[in-house]
Image (cartoon, coloured by chain):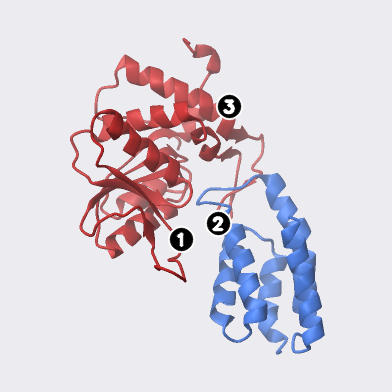
Chain colours: A blue, B red
Amino acid sequence: MNQTKTTELATLVSSGLNCPNLQKLSEICGQRVNELPILYWPLLRIFQELADEYDDQGITSARYEAVNSALQSPLLELFNLDLSTPSDLTSGLNRVLSAYIHL
Amino acid sequence: MLTHTEFASPTSEQMDKKRRKILKYLRRESFRSSHSETFPLSSGIKSKYYIDCKASLAFPEVRELVGDLIFEIVQGMQFDAVGGLFIGAYPMAMAVSDAYYRRGNAGIRAFVIRKEAKSHGLLKLIEGGVREASRVLIVDDVVTSGSSTVEAITKCRDEGLEVVRAIALVDRQEEHGGENIRKQAVEFDALFTLADLIEFNESDQDD
């Protein structure tokens, strides 16, 4: 997998998982879901669900901090991996999914 | 600038009492404030205030009072169904539908609009059996930018429904929500504004 493909995602994640960034991340994953469903489908669902929490309004600062604290690191690790290697892809994605499940 | 709610129709003492009861719940169950801008909003900016109306709408008394107040505002207006975008609008829609039922009109359906149509099964976007060309009232719990309400209006129109009016429980008045909704050529009111919640003094309660 071309590393530059995930650079845009990594930049957005680094700048914070706020609602506008979550919406952009969902949009990008949605556009790429047919390229690599095993990666982009779960990410799309995660970003959409987190964006939906705002419900055209807001979330508590504690929730915002919890989301960033739990997900930024495993997401950035995932985007730094060579995702064309199946074992790297599955282990990186597993870390993201585990963090999300426990959030 | 934050302002208080104003209604064209005269506000009776009974309506005032109902409004105060709802405000009491909203302040206790739904409203949080901070000295600095700490609550992230959907636009990306941060606010001193956080409102979660679902926590108040969880109480049957609130739903009944909200239904009564909206009934007072829209009575005389002809519509067949009331609903809005999942999830915040659903208890509001139920409240209005039930208020009509209590007054002998069992025909006002409550509906909810999915964010996305179901990808399997019947692929329905709107749940509630609303018939094409129905006249609908759109409701929402909190309006900030108005995007949920605007999305509800757009989706209803796409499904061939006629939107007669939009009403929210609280208008935060922070991100031109009301203005954005009115740009859709839909009359919009909110039962309360953020200013109402901020300045509500529970000690003023008469009950």
Quadrant position of the C terminus of chain A in the picture = bottom right
- Viewer can see residue B4: no
Q: At which x and y percent is residue B67?
A: 36, 32
Residue A66 in the figure: left or right of residue B82 = right
Q: Up-down: is B173 above or below A80?
A: above
Q: Disc 1 is attached to a residue of which chain? A: B
Cα separation, mark 3 vs mark 2, equals: 24 Å
Write the residue at 33% across / 15% down.
B13
Q: Which mark is residue A101?
A: none
Q: CB of mark 2 within 8 Å of CB of mark 1?
A: yes
Q: Up-down: is A19 above or below B79?
A: below
Q: CB of mark 3 within 8 Å of CB of mark 2?
A: no
* Residue bearing the label numbered 2: A52
Write the residue at 67% across / 61% down.
A17
Query: Which kind of residue does numbered mark 2 sit on?
Result: Asp
Q: Up-down: is B31 above or below B152?
A: above
Taking depth in this image into account, of A15 and A64 the one nearest to the observer is: A64
Q: Secondary structure at mark 1?
A: loop
Taking depth in this image into account, of B108 and A14 the one nearest to the observer is: B108
Same subunit: marks 3 and 1? yes
Quadrant position of the N terminus of chain A in the picture = bottom right
Residue B65 in the figure: left or right of residue A44 = left
The residue carrying pointer 1 sits among few (fewer than 14), some (14 to 19) or many (20 or more) residues within 10 Å by Cα, namely some
- Viewer can see residue B50: yes
Query: Which kind of residue does numbered mark 1 sit on?
Result: Lys
Q: Earlier in the sequence, mark 3 or mark 1?
A: 3
* Residue bearing the label numbered 1: B115
Taking depth in this image into account, of B17 and B79 the one nearest to the observer is: B79
Q: Residue B160 falls in which quadrant of the image?
A: bottom left
Q: At which x and y percent is residue B193?
A: 44, 34
Q: Disc 2 is attached to a residue of which chain? A: A
Q: Which mark is residue B28?
A: 3
